[in-house]
Amino acid sequence: MDLTLELVASTLRTIADPGPLASSASMDDGDYEAIANRLMADAEGPIEVFAYGSLLWKPAFQPSTEAPAVARGWHRAFRLRLTRWRGTPERPGLMMVLDRGGSCRGILQRLPETELRPGLLALLRREISSRTSSNLPRWISVESGGQTRRAIAFCARRDGPAYTGPLPDHEVADVLATAVGHAGSCAEYLYRTVESLERRGIRDGRLWSLQAMVARRIAAGSLMERGTER
């Protein structure tokens, strides 16, 4: 992988948390409970989550089982603009979301039967912070172990305020190489996702190309900085 831990480390710096935008409506306990109730009411058997991004390397709960899966009709893409977490209002970052079209290989994470509600609430609190979120949980069909199963996945809300729509790869790479927030950098997010997929034998061609592009941009930026210091 061209994007190395050393390159990622060069993108990290201390950033103060700007907090939620004044225009955003923050979720409260009742909101999370309502979404959890809806998802649990629509469950058909064990509750599983389709992990395709940061949940691969930082699960919101301890899965009782994991299994490879394919989501047909969905693909992962950097289409959520971040002004917090891994970006700032001055230099927004980008986060992945499942969007319509294509297919996506990921991992099914099963919620432990004894921790269904706490685990689900922990997941929702981590993934959603605003009532106008552009990243919403829904049940989708996935293929795993020769069977069609249902899983919760966080999918794009195309009319959401943070949804960017398709972006050129060079533009995505520019953002991922430079954006950083109080939770870390976008380059770190990309590195950990690609590394987690590769470790599981999953090669995402688009992400593989992006990590190489981002590595080149970070390296070029470091060379320019060293030249300026001289």
Image (spheres, rainbow, N blue to C red):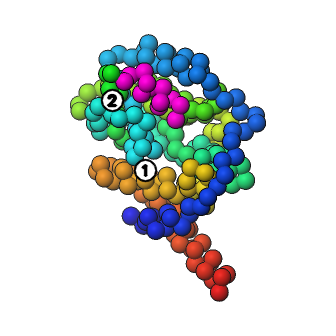
As drawn, the residue found furthest toward the bottom would be 230
The vertical placement of 215 against 184, above or below, is: below
Labels 2, 1: front one: 2
The verdict on residue 104 being magenta is no
Q: Residue at x 42, y 27 (%)?
A: 119
Answer with the quarter of the image where residue 32 lies.
top right
The secondary structure type at the circle numbered 2 is strand
The residue carrying pointer 1 sits among few (fewer than 14), some (14 to 19) or many (20 or more) residues within 10 Å by Cα, namely many
Residue 18 image point, x, y percent? 70, 46
Q: Earlier in the sequence, mark 2 or mark 1?
A: 2
Is residue 205 visible from the viewing direction of this image? no
The secondary structure type at the circle numbered 1 is helix
Amino acid marked by disc 1: Thr
* Closer to us: 96 or 5: 5
As drawn, the residue found furthest toward the left would be 146
Residue 221 image point, x, y percent? 60, 72
Q: Quadrant of the C terminus?
A: bottom right
User: Residue 175's mark?
Assistant: none
Q: Which residue is mark 1?
A: 193
The verdict on residue 123 being magenta is yes
* Closer to us: 169 or 157: 157
Residue 45 image point, x, y percent? 32, 17
Residue 89 image point, x, y percent? 71, 49
> What residue range appears in magenta?
115-126
The vertical placement of 205 against 1, above or below, is: above
Residue 164 horizontal side relative to residue 206, left or right: right
Real-space CA distance between mark 2 and mark 1, rounded to the nearest whole angstrom = 19 Å
The residue carrying pointer 2 sits among few (fewer than 14), some (14 to 19) or many (20 or more) residues within 10 Å by Cα, namely many
Amino acid marked by disc 2: Arg
